[in-house]
């Protein structure tokens, strides 16, 4: 159905464009280099014959594939982001193609002894005999989410080339800055014009997700008092020791490395300090809304307790909500999940319905009036040097998009 080399060529043409986003920037997109891929995508959409192709002042790309049936079908959308994570460099990506993977170690970089091994990454063994695209060990790959972009572009291209496949109106959207939590912030839902959509931003083949974390960020500032250490008795207040007490007072096993499935966590992502002031940044995550609120309260109560032990306030916490669990917006329209599940089964994929231990553009879009479950894009080990994607998974994801379009048209046929 989908030509393998065409998928490889398209994917590699996208990942070799550096689109790393920057959380310290206030602009949208947060980095100027994201424009290069945004403009490339807009031009490709025009060349393949899509309608209403647009790229706005913030680099959001949108396009429409008009319906080819006479009956009324709701417009549906497919969305992916083109930025890559600032957690690891995305500059000068040199992809490696591993044909007919044999289930053994893959040497990514011999000089630096960087190896992608199934002994550590057991998911590799699912893909024996398939074609893998890996890094050279010095960059991330960018499958998150350029695999999703590849699949959406390839699917609408295939539908244009095969008008015998009947479908309603299909909307396509590509966003900047998802990796820094802003992918949907300036997404024009009304302009997009879809009744519902799917983000192609999941991981392994078969993933279908309509639950994600409730998320918040917490900036913790700890104030101390510096005096000469030789004369410090009863006078010095070391902010780093207070910060250490704060860290150790949170549940030690409720951290990312000790949790899974629907278990929430506190995650200390940054810390810097001197005697006089220590600054920490936490992210707070939980699928359950009540537990999420309890976690935020726990941090505030802990700060209040520590403050009560000092003459002056020594800890200040600023907590800001980031996104919420899309489940409450998707459950009232569960037929959109059912269509995706049926589409997977129709192309011989076993659906893996599970909660996302993270967030996607879809979580924010769902609360903006565009219910938006998440579908696998095929990649693994995102945000680092061990990232890889099986080409066959990208092909299957493309087939799922085509089948969703077809099944949606059939569902609304009178």
Image (spheres, grey):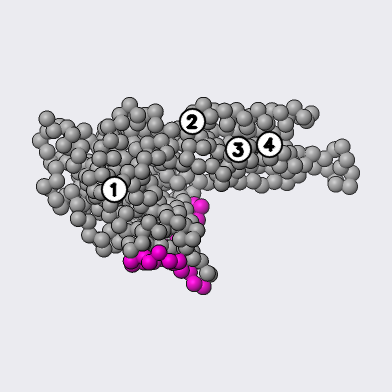
Quote the CA–CA distance across marks 4 and 2.
22 Å
Label 1 neighbourhood size at 10 Å, few (<14), some (14-19), many (20+)?
A: some
Image spot of residue 151 (x, y percent)? 29, 51
Task: Check whether the beta carbons of the residues at disc 4 and disc 2 lie within 8 A of each other.
Answer: no
Left or right of 59, for residue 180: right
Mark 3 or mark 2, which is nearer to you?
Answer: 2
Label disc, if present, on residue 288 of the rendered structure: 2
Q: Residue at x 45, y 53 (%)?
A: 382
- Give the secondary structure at mark 4: helix
Query: Earlier along the polypeptide chain: callout 4 or callout 2?
Result: 4
Quote the CA–CA distance across marks 4 and 3.
17 Å
Image spot of residue 145 (x, y percent)? 38, 50
Location of residue 172 by image quarter: top left
Location of residue 194 by image quarter: top left
> Is residue 131 on the magenta stretch?
no
Quote the CA–CA distance across marks 1 and 2.
29 Å
Quote the CA–CA distance across marks 4 and 1.
45 Å
- State which region is magenta: 86-111
Quote the CA–CA distance across marks 3 and 2.
22 Å
Q: Which residue is mark 4?
A: 249
Image spot of residue 216 (x, y percent)? 52, 35
Mark 4 or mark 1, which is nearer to you?
Answer: 1
- Give the secondary structure at mark 3: strand
Q: Is residue 143 above or below residue 238?
A: below
Q: Is residue 394 above or below residue 188?
A: below
Q: Residue at x 26, y 63 (%)?
A: 5
Label 2 neighbourhood size at 10 Å, few (<14), some (14-19), many (20+)?
A: some
- Residue furthest bottom as drawn: 111
Q: Which residue is mark 1?
A: 349
Mark 1 or mark 2, which is nearer to you?
Answer: 1
Main secondary structure of the magenta stretch: loop
- Give the secondary structure at mark 1: loop
């Amino acid at each position: 159905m989908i030509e393998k080399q065409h998928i490889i060529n398209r994917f590699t043409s996208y990942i070799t464009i550096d689109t790393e986003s920057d959380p310290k920037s206030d602009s949208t997109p947060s980095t100027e280099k994201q424009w290069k891929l945004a403009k490339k995508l807009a031009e490709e959409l025009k060349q393949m014959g899509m309608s209403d192709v647009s790229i706005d002042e913030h680099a959001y790309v949108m396009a429409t594939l008009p319906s080819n049936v006479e009956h009324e079908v709701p417009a549906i959308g497919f969305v992916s982001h083109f930025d890559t994570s600032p957690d690891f460099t995305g500059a000068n990506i040199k992809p490696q193609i591993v044909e007919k993977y044999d289930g053994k170690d893959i040497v990514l970089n011999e000089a630096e002894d960087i190896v992608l091994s199934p002994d550590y990454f057991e998911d590799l063994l699912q893909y024996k005999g398939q074609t893998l695209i890996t890094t050279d060990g010095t960059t991330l790959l960018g499958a998150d989410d350029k695999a999703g972009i590849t699949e959406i572009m390839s699917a609408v291209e295939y539908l244009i080339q095969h008008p015998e496949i009947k479908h309603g109106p299909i909307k396509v959207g590509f966003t900047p800055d998802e990796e820094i939590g802003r992918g949907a912030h300036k997404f024009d839902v009304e302009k997009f014009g879809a009744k519902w959509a799917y983000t192609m931003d999941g991981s392994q083949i078969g993933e279908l997700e309509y639950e994600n974390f409730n998320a918040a960020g917490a900036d913790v500032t700890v104030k101390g008092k510096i005096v000469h250490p030789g004369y410090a008795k009863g006078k010095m207040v070391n902010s780093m020791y207070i910060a250490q007490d704060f860290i150790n007072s949170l549940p030690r096993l409720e951290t990312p490395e000790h949790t899974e499935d629907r278990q929430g966590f506190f995650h200390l992502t940054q810390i810097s300090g001197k005697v006089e002031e220590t600054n920490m940044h936490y992210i707070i995550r939980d699928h359950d809304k009540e537990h999420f609120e309890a976690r935020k309260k726990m941090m505030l109560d802990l700060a209040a307790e520590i403050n009560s032990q000092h003459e002056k306030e020594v800890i200040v916490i600023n907590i800001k909500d980031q996104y919420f669990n899309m489940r409450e917006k998707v459950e009232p329209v569960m037929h959109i999940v059912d269509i995706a599940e049926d589409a997977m089964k129709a192309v011989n994929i076993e659906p893996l319905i599970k909660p996302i231990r993270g967030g996607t553009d879809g979580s924010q879009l769902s609360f903006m009036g565009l219910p938006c479950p998440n579908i696998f894009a095929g990649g693994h080990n995102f945000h680092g040097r061990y990232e890889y994607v099986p080409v066959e998974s990208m092909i299957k994801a493309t087939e799922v998009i085509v089948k969703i379009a077809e099944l949606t048209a059939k569902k609304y046929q009178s």
